[in-house]
Image (cartoon, rainbow, N blue to C red):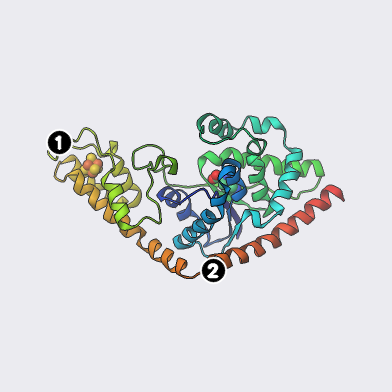
Amino acid sequence: MKTVFSGMRPTGKLHLGHLVGALDNWVKLQNVNRCIYCVADWHALMGEYEHSQNMRAYGLDMVVDWIACGIDPDRSIIFVQSDVPEHLELQMVFSCITPLGWLERNPTYKEQLREITTRDLQTYAFLGYPVLQAADILLYKAEAVPIGEDQLPHLELTRELSRRFNFIYKKDVFEDCEAILTPTPRLLGLDGRKMSKSYGNTINLSDSPDEILVKVKNMLTDPKRMRLKDVGHPDECNVFAYYKTFFPGRGHEVRTWCEGATQGCTDCKKTLADGIIEHLRPIREKRATILADRGYVEAVLKKGADQARAIAASTMKEVRQVIFG
Ligand code: TRP
Ligand code: SF4
C-alpha cells in the first residue's frame, strides 16, 4: 500500500476536464493505496485573496463532486488544507531551505505570471506556491502524487526539498515521491480553447441535462463541413475528440457517418449530448443524495481533518526534533 496525496484548489465548479484529467484516476487509485485528497484552500487564496468569501462554499461543493464521482470517505482521507495548520508550519521550514533561484526558475510560475493577467500574482506567497505544495505532500510522506503535466516542476522541487532537508539535518526524514500522470490526453473546452471556467467553455459535473444539451448543441464543428452533403473531417472536429474521450467504442461509427456524410452535425451533437448526460447521470444522482443529507459533507471533512492532523502532527514532531533537538 502506497500513500497517495493530491489536491485541488477550490476556485469554482468542477467540470469534465477535472473528471477525465484527475478524478477518474483518483477514484481508481483508492483500490490499492492509502489516498489522501486535499482541498487546497491556501493555494487558492494565493490567487484569489480578494474573493476569499466564496472559498469555503466552493470547497464544500468540490467535495460533493469528489464523493459523487466515487471518492470514498471510508477509504480515503478527504480534508481541507486550512483545517490542518501543520501545512503552514512545514511550509515555513521548507521556506528557510529553498534557494530563491529554484522558485524564480520554475517554468509553471513564469508561464502563469506571463499568461494570467486577471489576478495579482506578484506576491511573496505566489512565488512560494510550490513550497507549500511540497509541504502538503511531504507532511504525509506520500510516495505517489497524481497530477497534471503542468505540476511536474512542483514535484521536482518537492523531491529536491526532501533531499535538501535530509542532507542539511543529516537524517532521512523524507523520501522521494513519484508523479502519476493521468493517461487521458487533455480535453479541450467546448469552443476548442483550453478548458477553463474563465472562458465559460466547460460542461460542469453539476450541470442539468438541459444545460448539457444546449452547451453541446453550440459546440463548434469541422468548419469545412457546412451542410449535410459535405464530407467531414472528424480529426479536426472537437465534437469527435469528445466522443473519443467518453465513448471510444463509438469512434468508428462516428467517423463513418462524418466522412461518409450520412449524418449531420446536429444529430451527431445530439447523440453526444445524450451520451454525456447518461455518463454523468450517476454523478448527478449521487450529488442530489449527498446534498439532501445536510451536514454530511461537514462531517466527512471533520473526520478527514482529524485523520490528517494525526499524521501531520507526528511528522512535525519528528521535524521539530530533527531541527531543534
Ligand atoms: N497545485 C495543484 C493544482 O493547482 C493543487 C495542489 C495543492 C496539489 N497541493 C497539492 C496537487 C499537493 C498535488 C499535491 O492543481
Ligand atoms: Fe464533427 Fe460529428 Fe459534424 Fe463530423 S459529424 S464534423 S464529428 S460534429
Disc 2 Cβ-to-ligand 1 distance below 8 Å: no
- In this rendering, the answer to whether 99 lies above or below 67 is above
Q: Which mark is residue 230?
A: 1
Q: Secondary structure at mark 1?
A: loop
Label placed on residue 295? 2
From the viewer's side, name the closer residue of 258 and 43.
43
Between marks 1 and 2 in the image, the one whose residue lies nearer the viewer: 2
- Please indicate, yes or no, whether residue 174 appears anywhere in the rendered image: no
Q: Residue furthest right?
A: 325
- Quick one: 47 or 30, which is closer to the camera? 47
Residue 108 in picture, x, y percent from top left: 56, 35
Q: Amino acid at mark 1?
A: Asp
Residue 45 at x, y = what percent?
60, 45
| Residue at (83% x, 47% y) in the render | 323
Q: Which residue is drawn at the image coordinates 54% and 33% (left, top)?
A: 112
Contact, mark 1 vs mark 2 (Cβ under 8 Å): no
- What amino acid is at disc 2? Gly
Determine whether, in the image, residue 69 is placed left or right of residue 82. left
The image quadrant of residue 315 is bottom right
Question: Within 8 Å: ligand 2 and the Cβ of disc 1?
Answer: no
Q: Report the disc number at residue 291.
A: none
Q: Earlier in the sequence, mark 1 or mark 2?
A: 1
Look at the numbered disc 2 and give the secondary structure of its residue. loop
Local crowd size for mark 1, using a 10 Å CA cut-off: few (<14), some (14–19), many (≥20): some
Quadrant of the rendering where the N terminus is positioned: bottom right
* Residue 11 % position (x, y): 51, 48
Q: Is residue 194 visible?
A: yes
- Residue 282 position, x and y percent, is 38, 64
Residue drawn 63% across the image and 38% down it: 126
